[in-house]
Image (cartoon, rainbow, N blue to C red):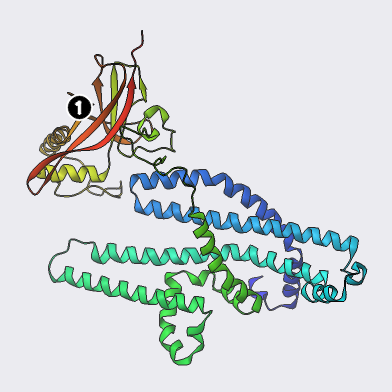
């Protein structure tokens, strides 16, 4: 079939299909909207989890999926509304036919104005048909545009990762750095020219001497932005007046929508639900019984509840790479010769077996790691330092961290403030500062 695209029978088939495509459009739109709305919760949860873990790659992935999902939802909803209006107009035309301005019996001034402004009812139906057909196709074109922008960002990040973010010394490292800078400058220049060509609808392709300079950049960025996948759609939009006008409207329209979604309502000048816990505010994210699995994530630490009837307080501190860097800075002997953090394959060729001496050294460093953590961190209730020792474990959301229990059997039944402090070394001076405060109420049960 693909080789017969010039055949008249194939063209007749396409003409017939495009006349009947509205049924498929509505069917696909309905299923797509239902499926996309159903998946938004899982996508947002994965995005928040990746953001919480500090995983840049997965943050970029799930953010891209989220944006593509909402582009489709918004466009397909508009498409369904317009297509429904189109079907309603067709039904009205069957009953009432065209608009008869003489029967309205308006004054000549209004009759002339309305006949010129509105025209025939068939023109209105044709306009709705054009918008419906184009909007369905442009939904996917917008996703390709977003993927093109994402590919540009990925190209920059990959260049930084390969050429600039390296530990190579000597002339090889300098050469890699210079090469990376040159590539980044070329990508930025090419992206600027590609954007100018996009918003001017092909201005750089029209001038002969400019087009000769722009042509190699265009070919390279066709690969970087993956435009070879959707180029026919773009030029099919640009070869007619209606497509060009719609392309001009789209960019400012979506920028405006993005700007409007940035607004939020502020209820108070002094109160906010996003504040960290303190002696005056209790953030639900710091109480284990208020966390919702796979939705709420601990930023610093939690205790079991706002109201504690147990004879102890369970304190859980979340782990992250920044915390480990602080441990390394505090105790230089913990810094490994080879950093094992980050992505790595579980497939090994030579094996991953440690000798007895290596295991003993590793266990010794692990004990030193825990000792350093406990030396750096201390727990206070009100102003009194508590005698506690942290150990490594996971919380209810399967997140790695450190846990300890504070004895409060003799604590007065009232509001108290739990504080976690951390030591740090700056310019050879050691200081102790509070990293989090969590208020709670202690009430004993009989």
Vertical position of residue 167 compared to residue 219: above or below: above
User: Which percent across, then down, holds residue 248?
Assistant: 57, 73
Q: Residue furthest left?
A: 428
**Count of picture labels:** 1
Quarter where residue 400 is shown: top left
Quick one: which residue is furthest to the top in this view? 446
Q: Is residue 232 left or right of residue 343?
A: right
Give coordinates of residue 240: x percent, y percent: 65, 79
Residue 114: image location, x then y, percent: 81, 72
Is 439 on the left-hand or right-hand side of 363? right
Q: Is residue 85 above or below residue 271?
A: below
Which quadrant of the figure contains the C terminus? top left
Seen at 22% across and 29% down, the residue is 391
Give residue 109's position: percent from left, percent from top.
83, 76
The quadrant of the picture occupied by the N terminus is: bottom right
Instruction: Give the camera-side residue of 291 and 4.
Output: 291
Label 1: state its secondary structure. Answer: loop
List the residue tagged with mark 1. Answer: 383
Name the foreground residue: 216 vs 139: 139
Q: Residue at x 87, y 73 (%)?
A: 107
Q: Quadrant of residue 319?
A: top left
Q: Residues within 10 Å of mark 1 (few under 14, many from 20)?
A: few
Picture quadrant where residue 165 is located: bottom left
Q: Is residue 177 above or below residue 401?
A: below
């Amino acid at each position: 079939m693909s080789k017969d695209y010039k055949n008249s029978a194939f063209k007749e088939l396409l003409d017939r299909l495009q006349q009947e495509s509205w049924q498929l459009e509505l069917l696909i739109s309905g299923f797509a909207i239902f499926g996309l709305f159903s998946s938004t919760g899982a996508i947002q949860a994965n995005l928040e989890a990746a953001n919480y873990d500090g995983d840049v790659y997965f943050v970029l992935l799930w953010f891209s999926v989220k944006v593509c999902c909402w582009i489709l939802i918004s466009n397909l909803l508009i498409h369904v509304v317009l297509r429904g209006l189109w079907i309603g107009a067709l039904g009205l035309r069957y009953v009432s036919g065209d608009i008869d301005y003489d029967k309205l019996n308006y004054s000549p001034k209004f009759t002339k104005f309305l006949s010129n402004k509105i025209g025939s009812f068939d023109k209105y139906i044709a306009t709705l048909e054009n918008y419906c057909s184009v909007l369905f196709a442009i939904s996917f074109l917008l996703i390709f545009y977003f993927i093109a922008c994402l590919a540009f960002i990925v190209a920059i990040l990959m260049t930084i990762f390969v050429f600039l973010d390296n530990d190579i010394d000597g002339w090889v490292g300098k050469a890699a750095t210079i090469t990376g800078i040159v590539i980044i400058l070329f990508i930025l220049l090419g992206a600027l020219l590609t954007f100018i060509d996009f918003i001017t609808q092909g201005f750089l392709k029209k001038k002969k001497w400019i087009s000769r300079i722009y042509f190699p950049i265009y070919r390279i960025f066709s690969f970087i932005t993956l435009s070879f996948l959707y180029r026919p759609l773009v030029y099919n939009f640009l070869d007619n007046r209606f497509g060009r006008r719609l392309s001009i409207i789209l960019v400012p329209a979506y920028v405006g929508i993005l700007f409007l979604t940035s607004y939020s309502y502020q209820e108070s000048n002094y109160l906010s639900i996003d504040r960290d816990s303190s002696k005056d505010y209790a953030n639900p994210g710091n109480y284990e019984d208020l966390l919702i699995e796979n939705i709420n994530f601990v930023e610093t630490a939690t205790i079991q509840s706002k109201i504690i009837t147990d004879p102890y307080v369970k304190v859980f501190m979340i782990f992250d790479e920044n915390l480990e860097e602080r441990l390394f800075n505090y105790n230089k002997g913990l810094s490994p010769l080879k950093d094992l953090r980050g992505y790595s394959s579980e497939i090994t060729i030579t094996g991953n077996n440690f000798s007895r001496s290596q295991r003993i050294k590793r266990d010794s460093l692990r004990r030193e790691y825990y000792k350093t953590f406990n030396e750096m961190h201390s727990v206070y209730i009100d102003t009194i330092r508590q005698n506690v020792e942290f150990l490594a474990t996971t919380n209810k959301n399967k997140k790695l961290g450190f846990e300890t229990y504070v004895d409060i059997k003799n604590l007065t039944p009232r509001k108290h403030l739990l504080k976690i402090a951390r030591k740090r070394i700056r310019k050879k001076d050691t200081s102790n500062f509070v990293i989090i405060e969590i208020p709670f109420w202690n009430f004993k049960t009989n």
